[in-house]
Amino acid sequence: MNQFEQLFQSNNANTLWTSSSGFEGFWYCSINCHIAAWQNPDFLQELGYDTATPPDWLSIIEQEDLADWTHRLADCMAGNNDTFEAFIRYKHIKGNQVQVCIKGTIIKDNQEKPVQWMGTYQNVSGKNENDGMRIFVEQSPTAMAMFDNSLRYIAASPKWQTDYHLEGLELIGKSHYEIFPEIGENWKQIHQECLNGATHRKEEEAFLRQDGSVQWLKWEVKPWYDVYGTIGGIIMYTEEISVKKEAEEKLRISEETFRGSFEYAAVGMARIDVKGHWLTVNQKLCEILGYSRQELDALTFQDLTHPDDLDADLTLFQEVLDGIRDNYQMEKRYIHRSGSTVYAILAVSVVRDLYGHVLYFVSQVIDITYLKKIEQQLSEALQNNQGILDASTQVAIIGTDTKGIITTFNKGAENMLGYTASEVLYKLTPELIHVADEVITRGKHLSELYGESVEGFDVFVFHAKNGSSDTRQWTYIHKDGSHFPVLLTVTAVKRKGDIIGYLGVATDIRLLKQAEEEVKELLFFTQEQNDKLRNFAHIVAHNLRSHSSGIAILLEMLKQDYPELVNEPILTLLHTASNNLNETIKSLSEIVEINNIIKEKMHPLAVKPLVDKAIQQIGIEMFYNRITFHNHIAPHIKVMAVPAYLESIILNLVTNAVKYSSPTKESFLHIEAYQEEKYWILVFQDNGLGINLELHGRKLFGMYKTFHGNNDARGIGLFMTKNQVEAMGGKIEVESQEGVGTTFKIYLKNEEN
Amino acid sequence: MKKINTVCIVEDDPVHLFVTNRFLTKSGLVEKVMVCSNGKDAFEQLNGMHLNEELLPELILLDLNMPVWDGWQFLDAFVKIPLKQKVVIYILTSSEASEDVRRAEFYNLKNNYIVKPITLPQLETIIRPLLS
């Protein structure tokens, strides 16, 4: 033992040291010894051992801590550390552990040779072992409270006191349940479990406050242990996280809202990176551009922008990138997948990070193609309208407001009326160019018709105001005072169903009037001529008949009175002449009659029986000429005709076929019928003599034309037939070749007409 | 043989007048023939007879186409005379025009319409029913 040791063994010195330095003790031992060679005897007493019969040190040290201690000593010996510090748990005689902090270093002699260990020890569990914890709790910046086994306050942090509004209250020693009588059984349960060693915690839990608001808390309740390892009570820790929670919730709602409004927006939306790539696009944008999301992934907005609009877009985009602006809006064109042009309004805003760097762009695209088209159509329509107004140099177009003040006065109106637009626009009403008497008369007429007073400008727009247009003849007054007739149409000009003015379109009908007069005159003249002609025909037919019948009867009487003259050639010739005259006049009368045909006389008539009848009637002639008839007309066929006419026509054609049959061959007459549109066509085809149509065609249906020199050819038959057919609304056609035959086609209206 | 008293011929054409007159004479059924040259002449004479309460002709043969008054004008005036005896009128005309026939129907004379020249048998057929 050296002097140093002796010095330390002196109780006085040790006590002095401890009280002045806060050390609880001092130790030393030889360099080869691991266990303190000397220690304050109080230390052993502290642990409850008798200093006279000290225990084996190794038996009262926690083995784990001893190993750690040994390890640290070795570290120092090796020169890695100059000092060491170790926490060693000693066994109290009662069984509980006392923790001691041991610090130490190596003492070296003059030759730098380690000679001794030396250090301090401090009881870190100590007698008042809970004080450290209590102080920790009291000074914690968080809300924390420490309770004993009976839930009595040992300590509470200021934050705890402010959070729970406990400022100024003396908490220490009071029961938690006394402070908070409202604490429920569930919590008491938790407290009890923690007193039995359990730990409870929740990262977040909502608590309903008395005022109805929600308080979000993060909390933990756990037991604390005293130096003897027994549970001394519990520690509660709470953290108010409502603000954080609200912020989180707001962020979540905000994100949700954005996502929802992004995806289901009525406008196209996209997030775009700084290069122009689509990061995310919504459905609407896909619809507008005609691409799927996958297709858009591979494209940039530059790819889809109309080349003429790209520069403007990129310039603005760059300005945002450069921080000159935060957003921009422009009207631009995209190219749809189909190649068509999409007109759009583009709004771009930027999202930057904390440091002002661009994260991405948000683009909103509104499709205005439809509006653009309408706009273009409207513009075209307006141009057309203006064009019409300007081009109508012969038609006066005069627009007014609802009061009648002229708002439009086109070139045509200027030409027609002699006023310039500037003379009348916004000053005068159309009454200026109308004859006052005409307006008054028309006004009176309207007033009578509709039982309300109509006068002034209302006269022109009365019908237009009630939804119809009004076209009538008026007299206009030229600036030079001359009058002329016009046809004026007035319509209402409406906007959204309300009348905002009227439009009058007037045509100068002077020339038309003149032409009308001429036509009237011509018609009158023609009518007169026609009447004269009719009269003439009538006189011819009627008066001549009177005279000729007189002659005939006188001749008859002459023969009776002077029978000796009967064979006198002159008388015979006179008789023949008289007969011919009578015959002629009879035909003439018939023709005059035909022109007076009345529609009511026409009936549906079956054709076949009439043909049969005609054939029967001329049976005798048929015998002489050896002609065969083939009536192929079906019994059901009916045509609209006057019975006497149809009989006459058929008889005439059948008779003709017989008369002009060829004496040198087997003659026939085919009669058939077919339908064409509204007509039944009766065909009379023979193989008779035929007619040279080139020579006679023009005259075939003329009066008194005979072509074969037959004795009984009256030359009136075909003329009559044609007249009768036409009087019934039909027509007749002929085909013929000399020596081959003749075909007549009679068109007569079918029953439905 | 019975005869009727008087037949009135209203006719402007001398040829037809002659013929009709001749047949009347030939028939031997008529006592007396009264001749009027147009409708107005006929009306005035017959009206005068009516006013004088003379017997009117039993039969009138009326031409249509005449100067001054035509047959129709005569009929219009004549039907207004309140006759006390029966007078049969036959239209004797050279007109076959349907318009005239229709018009005759209007005066109830459709069946009393004869187209000139009249024949003796026709005349006899007309007169016989009038022999009382």
Image (tube, rainbow, N blue to C red):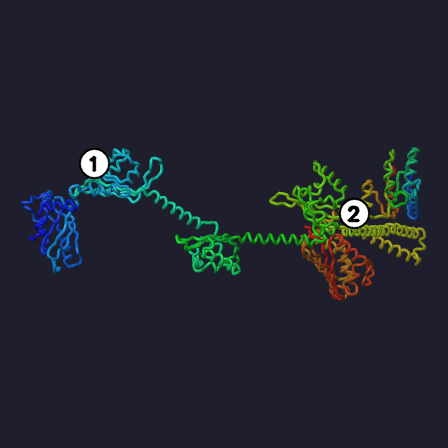
Residue A217 x %, y %: 31, 42
The label on residue A150 is 1
Work out whether residue A366 or residue A630 is closer to the camera in this orientation and state it.
A366
Check disc 1 and report its element: helix, strand or loop.
loop
Evaluate if marks 1 and 2 touch, with contact meaning CB atoms under 8 Å apart. Answer: no
Q: Are marks 1 and 2 on the same chain?
A: yes
Q: Quick one: SS at disc 2?
A: loop
Query: Disc 2 marks which amino acid?
Result: Gly
Pick whichever of labels 1 and 2 is earlier in the sequence.
Answer: 1
What residue would you read off at disc 2?
A481
Q: Chain of mark 1?
A: A
Where is residue B102 shown, x and y percent of the image?
Answer: 80, 44
**Residue B52 in the image, given as x and y percentages of width and height:** 93, 33
Residue A266 position in % (x across, y down): 48, 49
Task: Name the residue type under label 1.
Answer: Ser
* Nearer the observer, A412 or B69: A412
Q: Quadrant of residue B29?
A: top right
Label 1 neighbour load within 10 Å: few <14, some 14-19, many 20+: some
Describe residue A457's horizontal placement relative to residue A168 as left or right. right
The residue nearer to you, when weighing A218 against A127, is A127
The mark closer to the camera, 1 or 2, is 1
Is A357 left or right of A483, judged from the image as shown?
left
User: Can residue A606 be seen at all in this image of the molecule?
Assistant: no
- A189 above or below B94? above
Q: Which chain is indicated by disc 2?
A: A
Q: Is residue A546 visible?
A: yes
Look at the picture and state if A45 lies above or below A269.
above
